[in-house]
Image (spheres, rainbow, N blue to C red):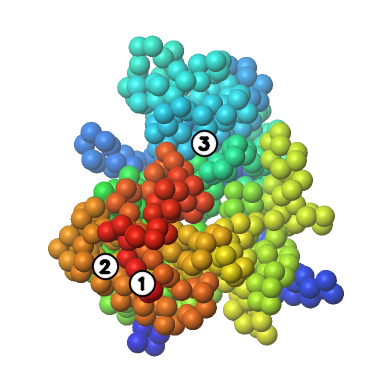
Amino acid sequence: MIAKFPFINLPFLERNLEVVERDDGAVLMRSKVPLGPVEAHLPAVLRRRALERPERPWLKQRCPQTGDWRTLSYGEAARQVDAATQWLLSQRLDGRNLMVLSGNTLEHAVIELAAMQARMPYVPVTPAYSLLSTDYAKLKAMVALIKPAVIFVQSASQFRAALHAVDSCDARVIYVDDPADDVDATAWQAVLATPVGPEVQASIDIITHDTVGKYLFTSGSTGEPKAVPVTQRMLCVSMAMHAQTVGHDPVAPEPVLLEWLPWSHVAGGTAIFNSILNDGGTMYIDDGRPVPGEFAKTLRNLEEVSPTRFSSVPAGYAMLADALEADETLGQQFFRRLRRLTSSGAKLPDSLYERLQTQAVRHLGHRIPFVASYGSTETCAATTVVHWPTGQAGLVGLPQPGVELKLVPLDEERYEIRARAASVMAGYLQQPELTRLAFDDEGYYRLGDAVTFVDRTKPEEGLAFAGRVAEEFKLQSGIFVRVGTLRVEVISSTAPLLRDVVVAGADLPYVALLAWPNPEACQERFGLRDAQALSCHAPFHDALRESLLRHNGRHTGSSMRIRRVMLLSEPPSSDGSEITDKGYINQRAVLARRASAVAALYADKPDANVVTIEA
């Protein structure tokens, strides 16, 4: 049994909790541990690290042409940031915004810090809105709201069409590679050649905690995109919280990360980007993603990089587990310096957690803590964190120092979670009505999720995720279906046959699923990996049916029993908002975009790609 092996010993933040139960049923929670020192602003952290360890690599990224790792040291980064700051100040743009359309690169990191030093809010945008969209509707809406004075792209030719689509914008364009004849732009080398004058330090000196450092857009999967103003206070408070999760360990190796999470989202661009800067560690920018066909790049990088901590989403961890089980050398390299793992977003299925810990024990002789966290764009990353070793997957932890939680009862077990902290936004940009709806009358931000206590009599055991309230629905019988809980149970019950599922059944007689097969597992078991072939493959159907019959045997209620599964051959579409940059499936977007598939799933005579579980 894996549970008999101890966890690696880490200097975790102590669990010291204050809990108040009110007469109205609400439960208030906060950590009694005071928040640690808070930096003045993010650029100050880079400047400090550049003085302390100028030669230490901050960021590394593969050169597309040679495959070699390019390196940006802390000292060189500070010099480049100052030059780019001077260029921005010389444009006399008076605090207007700087938008970045391209993904994670060394130059992107430099322009982010330069924009902050110039007091020009930095606005990273998901590259898919420029590269995968056909009508550029979301990009145009973002540009109209932000009105950027400068737009940064890695490749002028790659982003040419998007730049022309927002041609009405009067922004100056900066590009790094691949100039385009019909795009009026300034080359990155010209920006870095700008002589630095006293204006740079003068600009830095007047940055305050109230200065807006960036605007982050929410996912924009439904409705208009919402921009969250993120102040330097929010950034630095969140960074201080993160630093307290695991204390300094003098014998631990220097922090090394391999990270793919996009900087246009709060997890990659705020929690991870800021923490590695604050730690003075090194981040390898991963060119892979946790989707079929792209994860091979991550595995190639892991053959060369031994991280001290690693983060991904459940889909990424499923592919990693497949690879570790098949490759002894990869496992040795991956676990060599590993101290902790991080999983955010959807709950990690128990079966997948066990597979990963089995590999940890195999290579290290002990288990690796999963430091799961929970938060949102509006809360500037995590409000809660699991800061103790636990063998239970699916926890969201306890409030970080400086965070007050308000748990509002939904039923006998579940609570809606709300948060108040200095790291929480004041409101959305130019959307007062949405801002009003986002907060309750006591100023707590409504995260829209449900949680439960692991042990109601022992609140220090933490909170567990209990689903997205907005995703829940009723069957025709009036029974509520808790989508988040059911989805994780199904993936765990069918492991490793399915990569992901979407739960259907709103106002219908029973629960059914849209599902994507796991190609690696199916290749090993059935000799097939093509989704189209698997969708009608009888042995695969039989194995899936058997797994779900066992699942139904454990769950007698109609809200958890699965009657049918439609196997999908078309992968989730990013252009259709079905999957985010972080690899999360958008339940509502999939059901809306594939309404015809849902109708076929419930047809009197189902198609050959539908697995019937019971009459």
Q: Earlier in the sequence, mark 2 or mark 1?
A: 2
Q: Considering depth in this image, is 86 or 137 the residue closer to the camera?
A: 137
How dense is the environment of label 3, judged by Cα within 10 Å: few (below 14), some, or many (20 and up)?
A: many
At a point 56% along the width and 60% down the height, the residue shown is: 507
Disc 2 and disc 1: Cα gap in Å?
Answer: 10 Å
Which corner quadrant of the image does residue 331 belong to?
bottom left
**Can the viewer see residue 353 in this picture?**
no
Cβ atoms under marks 2 and 1 closer than 8 Å: no
Circle on res. 174 = none
Task: Give the residue type that dot 1 points to.
Answer: Ile
| Residue furthest left as drawn | 527
Q: Residue at x 36, y 78 (%)?
A: 549
Which residue is denoted by mark 3 in the rendering? 124
Q: Which mark is residue 613?
A: 1
Closest to the observer, 343 or 484: 484
Residue at (65%, 76%) from the top-left corner? 413
If you read the primary sequence from the N terminus, does the residue marked by circle 1 or circle 3 appear first? 3
Q: Secondary structure at mark 2?
A: helix
Q: Is residue 98 found left or right of 447 in the rendered image? A: left
Instruction: Determine which of the numbered discs, if any, sits on residue 541 in the image.
Output: 2
